[in-house]
Image (tube, rainbow, N blue to C red):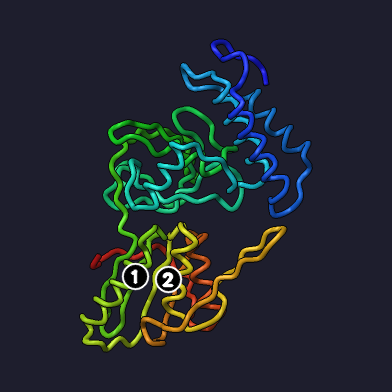
Amino acid sequence: MRQRSGAAGSAAPSDIDLFARIFERVRADYVSPIDESVLLAAASTAVVEAEPPQGDGSENWLVEQAIKGMLAKLDPYTTYLTREEYAAMQDSMRGHFGGLGIRVAKPEQGGGVLVVAPMEGAPAARAGLRSGDLIVGVDGKNVVELPMTEVVRMLRGRVGTSVILTIQRAEMAVFDVRLTREEIHTDTVEWHREGDFGYLKIGSFSEDTDEQVRLAIREMRLALGNRLSGLIVDLRDNPGGLLVESVAVSDDFMDQGEIVSTRSRTRTQRYRAGAGDIVDGVPMVLLVNGGSASAAEILAGALKDHRRAVLSAAGPTARGPFRR
């Protein structure tokens, strides 16, 4: 690693040890074998090209950049989280964080971050951001080649702070928009009735989504006098979230069968449904679109594969009236 002005003469052993442990974990456990020289070259390039935040040129920071550069070489989704980033992710999974109120995804082609949908009433929606916009810069930094997790980290932050997004929109010149971060609260489950049918909107899979789904179904059945003729589950623009919550919600509507399995080089883990369907087998339709990803795809795939629900590709997500 090259020396930077103001940096310590050598990295603390714990920092180097952290890099070594992560390198060994990737070498031994990543889903497919990868050339060690490729990983080391990516780490070295990341350090050379890194531009430290003002006042931070420490070796500890450089080790973090080396780790992130190495992991970025694997795929668009593998990344390293610092303590602060991990805490921010946990806040997000709890349904509240400082941010812009915007659901994003990795575009199918090219770089940047795709705007799936701005949340109604949040800073992104008030600023005029639209589904299909592509975020290509944050505070003047080109983010086209960055992992999506890194861009999301840059979008979030302390409430009251501002951020400038560079937006690429179809048939328009690239433009900048300034937004101020607010406290974002996400109710992941909403519902209403359509005659004798229930409509359930699942916006994401946070740590209490399964609990919210079960509560919504109980309220729905009480409102219908236990005459539930069918259920529509709306997964449009659902970017995913926690695997365990997706598995739990899938299990809610299945009596048996494999929900999903994960495979590494050394083992396979299978998640299976137990007995009990909280809607007693009533017909189900799942609404999906291009913004349905990750954990949402697990739920959709499990119910479709076991012929528990019919999938319907639909347009933009519906709006209220909802009960939460």
Residue 124 visible at all:
no
Q: Residue type at mark 2? A: Val
Name the residue that disc number 2 marks: 249
> Can you name the residue that lies furthest to the front here?
13
Horizontal side of 165 relative to 67 (left or right) equals left
Q: What is the x, y in percent for residue 183?
A: 28, 43
Q: Residue type at mark 1? A: Val
* Residue occupying the point 68% across, 63% down: 267
* Residue occupying the point 33% across, 73% down: 214
User: Do residues under tags 1 and 2 come within 8 Å of each other at their CB atoms?
Assistant: yes
Name the residue that disc number 1 marks: 213
Q: Secondary structure at mark 2?
A: helix
Q: What is the x, y in percent for residue 34?
A: 76, 46
Cα distance between the residues tagged 1 and 2: 7 Å
Q: Is residue 279 above or below residue 173?
A: below
Q: Secondary structure at mark 1?
A: helix
Q: What is the x, y in percent for residue 282?
A: 39, 87
Q: What is the x, y in percent for residue 279?
A: 36, 83
Q: How many neighbours does mark 1 have within 10 angstroms: few (below 14), some (14-19), or many (20 or more)?
A: many
Residue 217 visible at all:
yes
Q: Which corner quadrant holds the N terminus?
A: top right
Q: Of callouts 1 and 2, which one flags the residue occurring earlier in the amino acid sequence?
A: 1
> Can you name the residue that lies furthest to the top here?
5
